[in-house]
Amino acid sequence: MTTPRRVLLAIGETMAMVAPAVAERLTDAIVFQVDAGGAESNVAAHVASFGHSARWFSRLGDDPLGHRIVRQLAARGIDVSSVVLDGQHPTGVYVKDPGRGVRYYRAGSAATRLSADDAAGVDFGGVSILHVSGITAAISGSAAAFLDAVIGAAQDAGVGVSFDVNHRAPLWDATAAAPALLALARRADVVFVGRDEAETLWGTTDATSVRALLPEVAELVVKDGDVGATVFTADDTVFEPARPVEVVEVVGAGDAFAGGYLGALLDGAPLAERLRRGHARAALTLQTTSDFVDERYPS
């Protein structure tokens, strides 16, 4: 990758996230929070919390939830000036049931209408890293075309590409997802993937076998839950153990890890520190029902 210019552009769907204010079952909770929640905008929020410039682009409904999300992301220091508010299609919603998964209500959302035409309008001026995920490839055919086009545009502009595999089984099964996600990962400069996720998709068994499948990726990060994470580069392989933590909710922890890692990358930190920063941000998020915790990693 080229020398980072300390600006991250994250692209992908953000929805209105509804979750119990405390870790209670969805059927029993009385008090709920409504927050912005999306893999890529979560990453942007974590990067912004380290003092870097972070931008986020997608489509939202021109509705109260869409306007709420724009306001919330802006309050986290994210540049949302290029977001498209769509008057014809709604903002997606997802509901957390702590410890029991997530329910999505995103069919026909504004973000599913992303297309190659949207990619043509993305401004890469001053951007050092584009961060995207496999979720965008799964939400609609036009969004998949958008993702393909925007990655190509970033590469043409000399911008490094960060890709989180983020396989979502409710959106597409492993048979359909595996080849598409592998092709996308092979185009990226930085790739994040879970060890178990890679096993489900590609039949790999450990971090080393994932590296054998993706030898061309400049910076491959394989996460192994509460065990730790390994980063592979052309010159080095580094492992850092995860932080012990009492888990409240796992959703959002992967985004927090990626945000911490990319924030450290933009700081020019060594590989081990990038992994430690990722673990620290993930640990914070695992202890809450929210997708984002506004607490800077201690210096």
Image: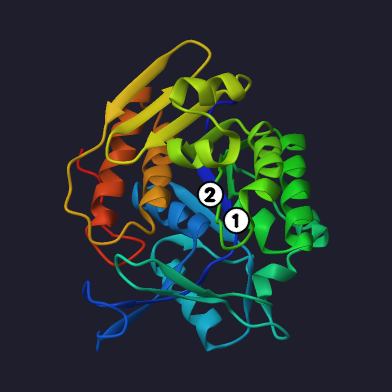
Quadrant assignment, res 33: bottom left
Residue found 25% across the figure and 85% down from its top: 28
Q: How many residues crowd mark 1 within 10 Å: few (<14), some (14–19), many (20+)?
A: many
Q: CA distance from mark 2 to mark 1?
A: 6 Å
User: Image check: 116 left or right of 106?
Assistant: right
Callout 1 secondary element: helix
Q: Looking at the figure, which quarter contains the C terminus?
A: top left
Q: Find residue 266 and report its horizontal and vertical position in percent.
A: 44, 35
Front one among 225 and 36? 225
Front one among 256 and 76? 256
Could you tell me if residue 270 is visible in this image? no
Q: Looking at the figure, which quarter contains the N terminus?
A: top right
Q: Find residue 96 and report its horizontal and vertical position in percent.
A: 38, 72
Residue holding disc 2: 166
* Picture layout, residue 195 above or below residue 297: above
Residue type, numbered disc 2:
Asn
User: Image check: 209 left or right of 224?
Assistant: right
Callout 2 secondary element: loop
User: Image check: 226 left or right of 159?
Assistant: left
Front one among 126 and 84? 84
Earlier along the polypeptide chain: callout 2 or callout 1?
1
Residue holding disc 1: 135
Residue found 28% across the figure and 67% down from its top: 289
* Picture layout, residue 285 above or below residue 86: above
Q: Find out whether the residues at labels 2 and 1 contact each other: C-beta distance under 8 Å.
A: yes
Residue found 43% across the figure and 69% down from its top: 102
Residue type, numbered disc 1:
Ile
Residue found 42% across the figure and 61% down from its top: 77
